[in-house]
Amino acid sequence: MIFSYRFGPGLVAASLLLMAGCTPPVPTDVMSTKSAVELRAMQERTFDTTDRNKALRSTIATLQDLGYIVNKIEPPAGTVSAEKDTILKLTASVFPHGTSQMAVRANAMVLIGGLKNTQVDDPLFYQQRFFEPLSRTIALTALPAGDAASDNKVATGPVIDANGVRIGR
């Protein structure tokens, strides 16, 4: 008892300082160096439907089919957050695009080395590992997104039909 009374508070303070030095570093985010236009081109696709609920449900089903654990769904905002194997996080947003389409935008972050969440900026990742499966689930062709003035421009990536067949470049 005498030991704990005389040395207890100092020992506790020293232990807390020592433990604070041993806590793992908080992961930092490393954002892409690509421009906003480049990111939007790879992360966003439109679908010829006005059914936001269908697009949101298809997005959730696709993420689950791909092995993601859905963490958060916000239907009013049209967002879904999910993670896979604790190192890959993907957030998808569903929103109207014009009067006859729904847009889906996905943003993925991968944890590298346990320290840095790095934004995925590989167009093939988004196309092959999210939008192609989403096209099959929603049974609609994923069209490259663009602003209203550029809807008729040539696609920057492959266009996939509802059966998963490449119909664009």
Image: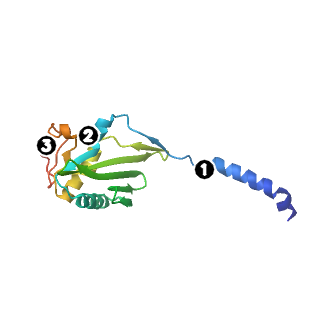
Instruction: Point out the image quarter for the N terminus.
Output: bottom right
Element type at marker 1? Answer: loop
Element type at marker 3? Answer: loop
Residue 19 relative to residue 69: left or right: right
Residue 27 relative to residue 91: left or right: right
The alpha-carbon separation of the residues under discs 2 and 1 comes to: 39 Å
Which residue matches tag 3?
Answer: 168
Q: Residue at x 31, y 58 (%)?
A: 63
The alpha-carbon separation of the residues under discs 1 and 3 comes to: 50 Å
Q: Position of residue 97 (x, y in %)?
A: 23, 48
**Farthest residue, direction left:** 167
Which residue matches tag 2?
Answer: 41
The one nearer the camera, 144 or 78, is 78
Coloring basis for residues? rainbow
Instruction: Point out the image quarter for the C terminus.
Output: top left
Which residue matches tag 1?
Answer: 23
Characterize the local packing of mark 2: few (<14), some (14-19) or many (20 or more) Cα atoms within 10 angstroms: some
Q: Amino acid at mark 2?
A: Ala
Element type at marker 2? Answer: helix
Characterize the local packing of mark 1: few (<14), some (14-19) or many (20 or more) Cα atoms within 10 angstroms: few
